[in-house]
Amino acid sequence: MPELRKDPIVGRWVIISTERGRRPIDLPRPEPPLPRTAANCPFCPGAEDKTPHEVFADRTGGAWSLRVVPNKFPALKIEGQLDRQGEGLYDKMNGVGAHEVIIETPRHDLTLSDLDESLIERVLVAYRERILDLKKDTRFRYVMVFKNQGAAAGATLEHTHSQLIALPVVPVNVAEMMRGARHYFEYKERCIFCDIIKQEIADGRRVIYENAGFVVVAPFAPKQPFETWVLPKAHAATYEEADVHSYRLLANALRTALRKLNTALASPPYNFMLHTAPFTDRGAQHFHWHVEIMPTLTKVAGFEWGSGFYINPTPPEDAAAFLRDLET
Amino acid sequence: MPELRKDPIVGRWVIISTERGRRPIDLPRPEPPLPRTAANCPFCPGAEDKTPHEVFADRTGGAWSLRVVPNKFPALKIEGQLDRQGEGLYDKMNGVGAHEVIIETPRHDLTLSDLDESLIERVLVAYRERILDLKKDTRFRYVMVFKNQGAAAGATLEHTHSQLIALPVVPVNVAEMMRGARHYFEYKERCIFCDIIKQEIADGRRVIYENAGFVVVAPFAPKQPFETWVLPKAHAATYEEADVHSYRLLANALRTALRKLNTALASPPYNFMLHTAPFTDRGAQHFHWHVEIMPTLTKVAGFEWGSGFYINPTPPEDAAAFLRDLET
């Protein structure tokens, strides 16, 4: 059973794998190295028996266009109770959680941004369905949806996919974001994200793209060059309770953002992360769900590890101006 | 002038470079690629004119054994005032700070852990001297000392060196650590680090090495495999005010830790970070300076970026047992 352990100083949780039978220097490779062809790919049609039993699929039109399966090498295990306990001044609990893979398309030769808007919409709806289902499990407090595109961004299989991890605690980054947003709300009685959106649209220098429901911006204080946020214009704390029509507009905004980044930076490795309110903060007036896209262009080194400061060589105004003008 | 900008939600500062005259997609390489030989190395003896004018040197015995020079491509600029200002709901200030390089030895063919203890002690004393000097500048609130060893850990020059950055704000990671430690102290009236050291030495499973002044441990909740902390046994908030004899004992502990990691993991790329109290928290009863060593073995991917959670495949008890038994 993996273990969740809490750093007693900053309160950050880590997941410690406790698989035995290997030497500590044999760092595990949780999945086989990136297959370059479809021949041995467990996510391609015909290889459905190579994945754990699917928990969701879209078969609109017959064959599957999308499948969600448990991760074969999960960071957390779905069975068991949390069993919170102390160990002297430390805190730990069982590594209970869900770790699922969203296979975004049967096509091995495409990436997410190559798909039509209607197919990306189905991926976004699949995220929603899985969050709604996992929310029913009272052991969980948060679901983090994310994508690693490219080996340098942490992908271990080439076939395009995203992942989600359901957690029994609210992650520290989410808690800090909630705390900051709540602090602002207490002072101003306004959502900080709504204020940011208003200021960004009025200013325009960091706006990359806009449609009826979403705005794509380079944030004012980006950690990495070309960091890009996709924000819904209307206030909503949780992704999974968004208006059903909004997923199509999000598909359009996300696809446009990714295609612009691909053109600008020669299809860079990237991560994206869905930030939504914890289960207990549903309906929060101070939080506003959004997607953060982070191209993998620079390294995290000693200064960043130690300080939490980031050195970003690309002003977001320059990145936004460059991306804004690109065709998609 | 670089700019310091604050994320309005979580309060994290970033350094935005504002060099002009290049396209945003031309990500700067702040220093030339790693030279493989000493032939074109700006840190070798004879090339002293290729660095900015030295701010500190150790010439015990004649020729220099160590030099400290300003970084030729600094993240922050030493001249100017902070000029704090708002921009709508955002906050920014001029990127004022010091960015220095500690050239640890004239030898191009050695790394820090190859040096004799007495030479490592000189490096550690140089950190102290530079912090004491930079503390006199009232614009600064913190000095972060760190080392990037190997290209994968962010080093851009091969010749062994460490760096320091003096900052006009307390970095978010340091502030969080201070907050957590203060919270514990308010409740227990004991330093959390002193309590950790006591528990670790009594328990023994995560202890890697010990000498009269320092203990080397694998922390209970490490972010990365083989993360290693070097802690002074006696309580002290600030590195630069440590007892003058303690630098030799630290040299022994740090050298031993690095040599064990080199043997275990085939000289891995790594970062180390010196955590000391901010200038205003000098003499703090709740904080305890220490060094964190982080081998670069796994990637930061979407889950880590989004959640701040880390998935660590190596239990620290296993890493510690393995390292403890290695000869150095």
Image (cartoon, coloured by chain):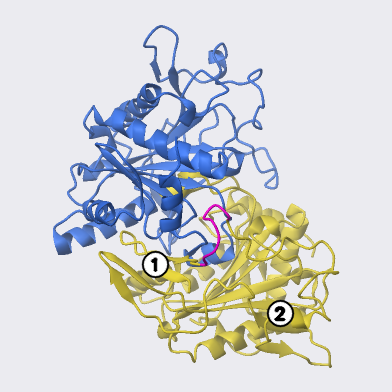
Chain colours: A yellow, B blue
Tell me if residue A35 comes above or below residue A190 in the rendering. above
B240, A5: nearer the viewer:
A5
Q: Is label 1 in a helix, a strand or a loop?
A: strand
Tell me if residue B102 comes above or below residue B214 in the rendering. above
Are discs 2 and 1 both within one chain?
Answer: yes
Q: Quadrant of the rendered structure where residue B44 is?
A: top right
Q: Quick check: A45 left or right of A255?
A: right
Tell me if residue B191 comes above or below residue B291 in the rendering. below
Q: Residue A5 carries which label?
A: 1
Q: Residue B291 carries which label?
A: none
Is residue A25 part of the magenta span, yes or no? yes
- For this orientation, the residue located farthest to the top is B62
In the image, what residue type sits under mark 2? Thr
Question: What residue is shown at x 39% (from left), y 52% (from top)?
Answer: B218
Q: Quick check: B170 left or right of B151?
A: left
- For this orientation, the residue located farthest to the left is B189
B19, A292: nearer the viewer:
A292
Name the residue carrying label 2: A51
- Magenta segment boundaries in residue numbering: A19-26
Q: Is label 2 in a helix, a strand or a loop?
A: loop
Chain under numbered label 1: A
Name the spot of residue B151 as percent of width and height, x first. 61, 39
Tag 2 and tag 1, C-beta contact below 8 Å: no
Question: What residue is shown at x 34% (from left), y 47% (from top)?
Answer: B170
Tell me if residue B34 comes above or below residue A171 in the rendering. above
Is residue B253 part of the magenta span, yes or no? no
Quarter of the image where the C terminus of chain A is located: bottom right
Name the spot of residue B117 as percent of width and height, x first. 38, 25
Q: Give the Cα separation between the discs numbered 2 and 1.
A: 29 Å
Can see residue A325? no
Name the spot of residue A198 as percent of width and height, x first. 52, 70
